[in-house]
Amino acid sequence: MSRPSHSRGPGDPASPPGLVEHYFRHEYGRMVAVLVRQVGLHHLEAVEDAAQGALLAALTAWVANGIPQDPGAWLHRVAHNRLLGVLRKDRGHQHILASAADLGAENGEEPVSPAFAGEVRDELLRMLFACCDEKIPHESRLVLALKTLCGFSTGEIAFRLFTTEATVYKRLARARERLRQGEVDTQTPRLESLRSRLPSVHAVVYLIFNEGYLSTHAERAIRAELCEEAIRLGTLLATHPVGAAPPTFALLALMHLHAARLASRQDATGGLLLLEEQDRSLWDAEHLRQGASWLARAAHGDVFTRFHAEAGIAAEHCFAPSFADTRWNEIAELYAMLERIDPSPIHTLNRAVAVAQGQGPRAGLAALDGMVPPAWLDGHYLWDAVLADLHHRAGNAAAAERHRDQALAAAPSTAVRKLLQRRLTKPTL
Amino acid sequence: MSKRNYLVLLRSKPAGGQPRPSPEQMQQMFAAYNAWKEKFKDDILDMGDKLKTQGRVVTASGVADGPFVETKEVVGGYMIVSAENFERAVEVVRACPAVHAPGASLEIRELEGARM
């Protein structure tokens, strides 16, 4: 009996070529952005369903026939046709079909596929700005961006943000509701006209980054993922006229410089490591290079944002030859600038730490003299941990012990508690 | 040794209630299916197809809409495996990622080869 050879798709090698990491997730974001541009934001849900359906169809078809020559175009065509089918069913949507030139293509006609990477980049940015619409509540902007642009499911978002799926769902529903209420003309504003939303876009991108960077998630890959997404969106922004400005460059520099040190923050058992304990050879050279390059570009112009100050601080740490040889006085000065731009007791606390490193623990304590911590910081482990450390090093045993006990009691996780125990029981430096 | 052909029917619970896979999960499934297909490429005669949910049931008394939604399981797809014996066919099918889908079952039926 001869084995009939079934078709395996064009140019299919013995083993199908793999897809780049997160291809489906990112392609989902690209499909959503392009289709939303065609039918309007108020159809976001139908668009997302179409993108989801296209990926599901690909799963079956590509296993059977191999990955098509242009998988992106394949997906967009399928998603486009699915969306067309859904909207056609609803007579109320006829005007959309008529007005969307691409969707007006009759049966058999190929939809205009986003052949140029630049075109898709515009749509992705437009979607990012749409997520940062003032009409959308703050906490909804982040989840909307993660869902539509990054292609995470509600479950995956909940897992990464340490919240429940129901909460994520509610936030998404609120965002979609606001978008539905939006004027139909929201689908066609010029990208440049959205420039006023840039600060809000920066805030959301930085929030995504920090959700990954500050997360105490046990798995590093999970944390790194959100950092990578934020850097991806930040790069998109920085390389387009609408976002190419020093604050964006500073934000991108900051994210690269933080990301460079991501791998070295944990020991082999997942315990957190202090900066002085980190193996500097583990720092990611490519991130460092990118960080330095974007920071240089951020220095042009006459604006100095919080991102400039924070990137400057990160750069001081990253490019210091060793912990001991860090330019602490420069860092203290940058924290002082950060305090002026964005007053926060956390910045004051950080400045005190830098001052103590550069000029001794008593100078550090003096920097906090007269400061009354707000309620949220009083009782936060960081406040007590810094005071315990400074008092310990200044020889004030009683005060050190009191703050140490309070810091340990307030530690939010086992990893943090272990770190505090190690740090705060060390002999005087 | 000549091989025998086996029809594999994929059954699953009617859709609904189960969360849809995320894009990331779909990519993982894609990789898993590809690895399976590659490993057993000499045994998988036909990757088959998925079945659409709508259908008709024809009997002597007429034509009805089907399949019946009240049934606990619906046939969602098929494929054809070619193997030396039943044991090998079971081995191939047991390694198929579809086995791990919630509520899924795969039925293996040897084809008689009456028309060969």
Image: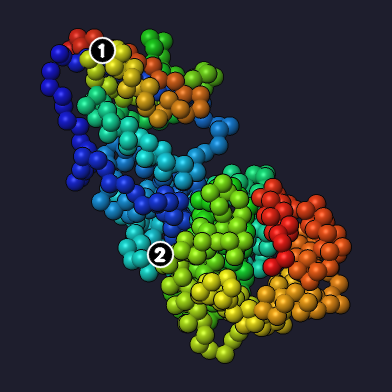
Q: Is residue B101 visible?
A: yes
Tell me the subunit letter for badge 2.
Answer: A
Give the structural element (helix, strand or loop) at label 1.
loop
Residue highlighted by disc 2? A120
> Given the image, what chain letter belongs to the residue carrying mark 1?
B
Total number of numbered discs in the rendering: 2
Where does the image place residue A352, in percent across and percent down from the top left? 73, 75
Element on which disc 2 rests: helix
Say if A123 sits above or below A358 in the image: above
Is residue A411 shown left or right of residue B75? Answer: right
Give how far across and how far down residue A404 sits, in percent.
Answer: 80, 58
> Would residue A167 be found to the left or right of residue A106 on screen?
right
Left or right position of A84 against A10? right
Which residue occupies the foreground of this view, A78 or A85?
A: A78
Q: Residues within 10 Å of mark 2 (few under 14, many from 20)?
A: some
Identify residue for label 1.
B85
- How far across and how far down the image is residue A67, in percent? 29, 45
Identified at 81% across, 69% down, the residue is A395
Residue A193's place in the image compared with B111, above or below, is: below
Q: Dot 1, crowdedness within 10 Å: few (<14), some or many (≥20)? A: some
x then y, percent, for residue A346: 73, 70
Residue A243 seen: no
